[in-house]
Amino acid sequence: MSPEKCLHQADGKERCVLQDRQDRIFVALDLDNMDDALRLVDRLGGIFRSYKVGMQLYNRVGPELVSRLHEEGCRVFADLKFHDIPNTVAGAADSMTRLGVFMLNVHVAGGIEMMRRAKEAAVKRAEALGIPAPLVVGVTQLTSTTQEMLNQEIGIPGTMEETVTRYAKLAKEAGLDGVVASGHEIQAIREACGEDFLTVIPGIRPAWSEKNDQARVMTPQAAFAAGAHYLVIGRAITAASDPRAAALRILEELERDR
Ligand code: C5P
């Protein structure tokens, strides 16, 4: 099934994941305070309405930010990368579900039981509240991790692709909706887990932007062409001198590429 029309089987119910490329791009709000975040959202109004809230901003301003983004008509990916004992992570997933987030994530390295409990807690809370269950995705290997780091520093043998594929299979076994990985692993994940298993791709860099601390980067066009369901774009937009112009340039390039 093409990612353009993908349907996601959540909790036995069929529901659409986002279809338009524009809505499948989450802008990473890696900023220091609520005002800056809301100002950026305002500047990107009419272009993007999907935002990723990560540990930098969430740990400063907390759940109120999620409510404010919802008031602005945005959907939120809570990128808090939970990784703890299963009971604690289930509680964290429950808490984020109460906030009505569209997507949340946990580290695959926490193991199958931890991931399963997170997903179950999200589904249970969503049912109790009568809201759509958030997508729960697993972080495989960070896009800042290189092959050398993986083997020499972290001590995981084999290639990056092997590790990411193995993690993706674990996430699928645990009942998660998909994984976060680099664009370079999309193909292997699709082959191992099927094309409906969601791929959320950070480390996105248009050809004209800085790589920064990311190691495994890919352009938005290449990531969508490889079958990515969702992209995460941060500094290429947020650190640009004119974020709105950068956002429009990205969309124009995607449009040209269709
Ligand atoms: O600024 P940049 O586009 O590099 O931001 C990427 C965002 O995606 C950051 O918020 C980072 O925390 C997040 N992320 C990542 N690699 C992962 C998972 C999340 O870069 N594997």
Image (cartoon, rainbow, N blue to C red):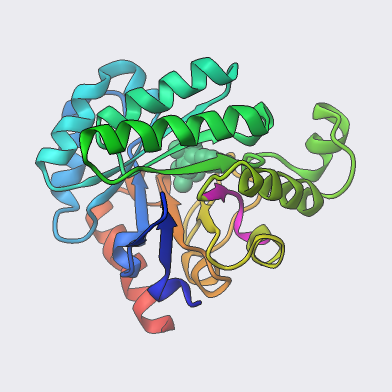
- Looking at the picture, how far across and down is residue 154, in whole percent? 80, 28
Q: Residue furthest left?
A: 71
Q: Residue at x 54, y 45 (%)?
A: 176
Q: Nearer the viewer, residue 163 or 51?
A: 163
Q: Residue at x 29, y 61 (%)?
A: 23
**Numbered disc total:** 0
- Looking at the rendering, the stretch of residues picked out in magenta corresponds to 178-184
Q: Nearer the viewer, residue 32 or 110?
A: 110
> Where, quadrant-wise, is the C terminus in this rendering?
bottom left
- Asked whether residue 48 is in view, the answer is yes
Left or right position of 18 against 72: right
Left or right position of 202 against 51: right
Q: Nearer the viewer, residue 152 or 70?
A: 70
Q: Residue at x 63, y 40 (%)?
A: 144
As for residue 201 lying within the magenta part, the answer is no
Left or right position of 143 against 210: right
- Looking at the picture, how far across and down is residue 118, in whole percent? 49, 30
- Looking at the picture, how far across and down is residue 15, in whole percent? 33, 61
Q: In which image quadrant can residue 69 be found?
A: top left
- Asked whether residue 242 is in view, the answer is no
- Looking at the picture, how far across and down is residue 162, in whole percent? 81, 52
Please tell me whether residue 19 is drawn above or below residue 217 in the rendered image: below
Q: Residue at x 37, y 25 (%)?
A: 94
Please tell me whether residue 32 is drawn above or below residue 129 in the rendered image: above
